[in-house]
Amino acid sequence: MPGLVVFGRRWAIGSDDFVLPGAFELFVRLVWWIGILVLYTVHKGQFNCPGGGLLHSYLLVLLILLASIICALSALVYISMQGTISNPGPRKSLPKILYTRLLLYFPEFIWAVVGAVWVSDSSVQCEKTVINGIIGTVIASWIIIVFTIIGVVIVFDPLGGKKTFYLPDGGSRNLESSQSGQLLYNVKSSATRVWEKRIRLLCCCIVQDDDHRVAFTSIAELFRSYFSDTDLVPSDIAAGLILLHQEQDKMENCPKEPEEVLCHSPSSLVTDDLDVELENAAHYMLFAAAAYGWPYYIYTNPFTALCKLNGDCCSNRAVDADITGSDRHNFHFGSILKITGLQYRDFIHISFHNKIYEIPFFVALDHKKEAIVVAVRGTLSFEDILTDLSADCEDLTLEDVLENGFVHKGITQAANYIYRKLINDGILNQAFTIAPEYKLVIVGHSLGGGTASILAIMLRNSFPTLRCYAFSPPGGLLSKSLADYTKHFIVSVILGKDLVARLSMPNMEDLKRRIVRIVANCNRPKYQILLRGCWYEVFGGDPDDFPTELDGRNQDALSQPLLAEESLMVRRSPSYSALEDESQLNSPPQYPHLYLPGKIIHIVEECSSRRLCSSDIKYTARWSNETVFSSILISPKMITDHMPDVVLKALNSLSQEHGSCLSC
C-alpha cells in the first residue's frame, strides 16, 4: 500500500510484494547458474564437436546473463524487504531496479531462442549430456518467461491509468467544479465498466437476458463503490486478514467479565424452548440440505452415492409429483428421496428450474411432523451467485403488516418467484387438499434460508401458524422493523463464525476499515506478516503482539503519509451507512443496516481445537441476538461453518446429546 506505479500507471501489486516470488526465482536462478557452471567446467576442453564453438559462446554468455539477473534479483528482494506496508519510503528506488530486471528479459528471450535453434539443429553432434543440459536451460528460460507474462496479466490494473482522488492534508479539493466533477464521473464510469466486463467474463457460460444485464450493472456498481476509496493491493488484504485473525484470537483468549458470563445463563423455560427448536431444526435441516440434490448427496457419500443413484434412478418408477426443470436420469429427485427418507407419493411439486432470481425448490408432505414443507435450495450456480450479489435494498410492502421495511433486492425477487408459483399455480392449495390438518413449514439454507424467510413474511397473513427455519441465512437481509416482526415465526440457525451470516455492506465496510487500520499501524514488513500468519494458521501457536509504529511517533517520521487510512477517515465509501452523527448527507444511504431474520440460535464449538483438523468436536447452543453478528470474524472455519453438512452434523450432535440426557 499504495499500489506500485511503473510505466506511468498503477499496478495491483505493492513494492513489498517481490520478496517471496523474488526469493523463489533467486533460488532457481542460483541452482541454474551453478548447474551451468559445473557443465561448462566439466566439458571445458571438449567443445571440438560440430557446433561446439557456438555452444561454448552460448554457455559463456548464459553464465554472464544469469549472474546479472541474480544481482538484479538480489537487489530487488533486498529493497522490497525494507519499510512497512504503510511506509513505502525505504522502497522508493525499487522501480528503477524493476526496470533493470525487466530489461534483462530481452537478452534472456533472445538467448532462449538461440538455444532452441541450436538444440533443433540436426548437424550438432556434441556429447549427449551437454545437449540435455542446453535443452533443460531452454525449457527453464521459457517457463520463467511464460510465468512472468502470466504474472503481469494478473497484476495488471485496467484502471491503473486513472487518477485516484485523495484529499490533501490541511486542505480541501474542489470536487464540485464542473471539470473535477466530470473527471470523477469518468473515473467512476470506467470502474463500473471494468467490473461489468469481469462479471460478464465469469458468467460467459450462462444464457444472458435483460435480467442478467441489469444484475451485472448493479453488481458492478456495488464492487466499484466498495473498492473505490482504498489503495490496497490483494496482498495487503491478505496481511490484514491475518493480523485481524490473530488480534481476534488474542481477544478471545482474554478472560470474560463475570457479568458477561452470567448474562448467558438462560432460564429453564428458555432452555426447554431451545431444546425443542433444536430438535425441529435438526429434522428440517435434512430438507434444506436435500434441496441441493445430487451434488450434496455425492459430496456427503463420495464412495457409494453413484452406485445407489444408478440403482434407483434407472428403474424409471412412476412419479406422482409435479416436476419442472431439467433432472437428467432423475439424479436430483433420487438424491432428495435418499436424504429425506420420504416416499415418491409424499412430493407435491418439485422445481429444478434455475435462472437469476428464480431458484429451485420442492414441496413435500412430512408425516413425521405433520407438516407441509417448502424447501428452498441455496447457492449452487452462477445464477444463484448473481442473485446473492444483487444486494441493493428495496421496500417490502405487505397488506395488514405495519412493519414494512427494507429487504435484500435479489433474494426478495427470488421469494416473489416462489410465492407466485405456490399461490398462483395452486401448489399450496393442492397440498392442503391432501393434508388439511398439516401446518406449513418453510426451510432453506444460505440463499435458500434468506429466500425462505422473506417467503414466510409474504405468506404469514394467509397462513398464521406457519413456521420458518432459516439455516445460515445472509446477514444483510431485513431491516430492523421486519427482523423484529419475524421473531414470532422464524428461527435462524447460525454455526460458529459463519461468514455468510455476517455478510452485509455495512459489515464489509467495517471490515475494510479494520484492515486498513491494522495494516497501517503494524510496523512489521509484509513478508514477515504473511510467513508468520501461514505458520500460525497451519501449526497454531500464540498470536502476535501487534507492535505499532503509530504509538508515540511523529507523523512526519514516515516517508509517506497513510493515504489509505486518511482516505477512509476523510471520505467514506458511498455504500457505507454511517451513524447519524457521522453522516454528512441528507439523502438516505444506498445500503442501510440489514439484519438476520427471526429468533437466532447460535451454535458454537466447545472443548475443541480451533484448527481445521480437529476431530473431537462438541457443540453448545444458545439464543442470541442480531448485534452479535454485526462484525465479520476471521477464522479458518468461517467458510466451513457455512457448509450444509457441517451445520447438519452440529444439529444432529446437539439433538442426540439432548436425547441422551432425557433418557438418563
Image (cartoon, helix red, strand yellow):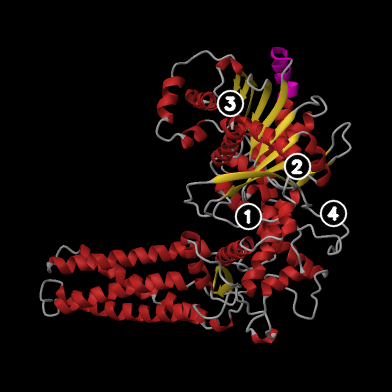
Q: Is residue 207 left or right of residue 409?
A: left
Rounded to the nearest angstrom, the CA distance separating label 4 from label 2 is 41 Å
Q: Is residue 100 left or right of residue 518?
A: left
- Mark carried by residue 588: 4
Segment tinted magenta in the rendering: 421-436
Inspect the magenta stretch and tell me whether residue 183 lies in it.
no
- Name the image quarter holding the N terminus: bottom right
Q: Earlier in the sequence, mark 2 or mark 1?
A: 1
Tell me the mark number nearer the camera, choosing from 1 and 3. Answer: 3
Give the residue type that dot 4 points to: Pro
Which quarter of the figure has residue 459? top right
Write down the residue under mark 3: 325
Look at the numbered disc 3 and give the secondary structure of its residue. Answer: loop
Percent coordinates x, y for residue 481 in the rendering: 84, 44
- Mark carried by residue 195: 1
Write down the residue under mark 2: 267
Whether residue 357 is visible here, answered yes or no, is: no
Tell me the mark number nearer the camera, choosing from 2 and 1. Answer: 2
Q: Earlier in the sequence, mark 3 or mark 4?
A: 3
Q: Mark 4 and mark 3 in contact (Cβ < 8 Å)?
A: no
How many tags in the picture? 4
Give the residue type that dot 2 points to: Ser
Q: Nearer the viewer, residue 630 or 228?
A: 630
Q: Residues within 10 Å of mark 4 (few under 14, many from 20)?
A: few
Which residue is located at x 14 percent, y 65 percent?
128
Q: Residues within 10 Å of mark 3 (few under 14, many from 20)?
A: few
Percent coordinates x, y for residue 629 in the rendering: 70, 51
Percent coordinates x, y for residue 251 in the rendering: 64, 63
